[in-house]
């Protein structure tokens, strides 16, 4: 089975536009941005989907929330507002089976989403 795309990014096998990194979390610019700011926040460890998050991941998920807030500060979207999205499965259009939070900002976004 071929290795997960985001695991390859974590290993440094694929180029990334890094926004920030901690011991367990990586944040990088989405290759196909849907907003002026579109950053992906991922755990370095492979978790295939939000549905696979376990109690043992509590500290990691908390770290990811901290990173999301740091990314928002770093990219200047705290005041104007931003959106955090997790896609799971076909109906949501999940394309990469490695947990990731989309951090989107820099423009007005509609609600509800399409
Ligand atoms: P999702 O549809 O929620 O699984 O989102 C996957 C995201 O990964 C999409 O927004 C893609 O544009 C993004 N993506 C795919 N390959 C790369 C890459 N090599 N570097 C950065 N982002 C990527």
Image (cartoon, rainbow, N blue to C red):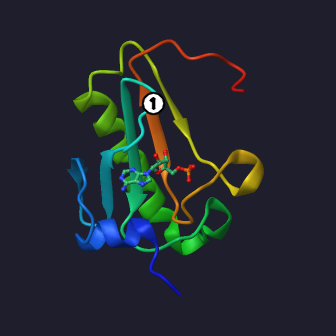
Residue drawn at (68%, 64%), measured in percent from left and top? 51
Residue 74's place in the image compared with 21, above or below, is above
**Quarter the C terminus occupies:** top right
Can you tell me whether the CB of the residue at mark 1 lies under 8 Å from the nearest atom of ligand 1? no
Residue 40's place in the image compared with 46, above or below, is above
Residue drawn at (44%, 14%), measured in percent from left and top? 107
- What residue does disc 1 label? 104
Residue drawn at (42%, 40%), measured in percent from left and top? 32
Q: State left or right for residue 8 relative to residue 114.
A: left
User: Within the image, what quadrant is residue 39 found in?
Assistant: top left
Assess disc 1: are there few (<14), some (14-19) or many (≥20) residues with their C-alpha within 10 Å of its C-alpha: many
Residue reaching furthest right? 91
Residue drawn at (27%, 74%), measured in percent from left and top? 11
Q: State left or right for residue 109 relative to residue 105.
A: right
The total number of labels drawn is 1
Give percent across and percent down for residue 99: 52, 60
84 or 36, nearer to the observer? 36
Residue 95's place in the image compared with 72, above or below, is below
62 or 33, nearer to the observer? 33
Give percent across and percent down for residue 33: 41, 34
User: Within the image, what quadrant is residue 49 found in?
Assistant: bottom right
Give percent across and percent down for residue 23: 24, 66
69 or 9, nearer to the observer? 9
Give percent across and percent down for residue 28: 30, 48
Secondary structure type for disc 1: strand
User: Within the image, what quadrant is residue 29 found in?
Assistant: top left
Residue reaching furthest bottom? 1
């Amino acid at each position: 089975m071929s290795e997960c795309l985001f695991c390859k990014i974590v290993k440094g096998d694929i180029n990334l536009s890094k926004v920030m990194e901690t011991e367990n979390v990586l944040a990088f610019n989405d290759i196909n941005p849907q907003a002026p700011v579109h950053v992906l926040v991922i755990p370095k460890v492979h978790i295939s989907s939000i549905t696979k998050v376990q109690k043992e991941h509590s500290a990691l998920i908390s770290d990811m929330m901290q990173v999301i807030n740091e990314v928002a500060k770093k990219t200047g979207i705290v005041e104007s507002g931003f959106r955090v999205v997790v896609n799971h499965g076909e109906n949501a259009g999940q394309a990469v089976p490695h947990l990731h939070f989309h951090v989107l900002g820099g423009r007005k976004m509609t609600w509800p989403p399409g």
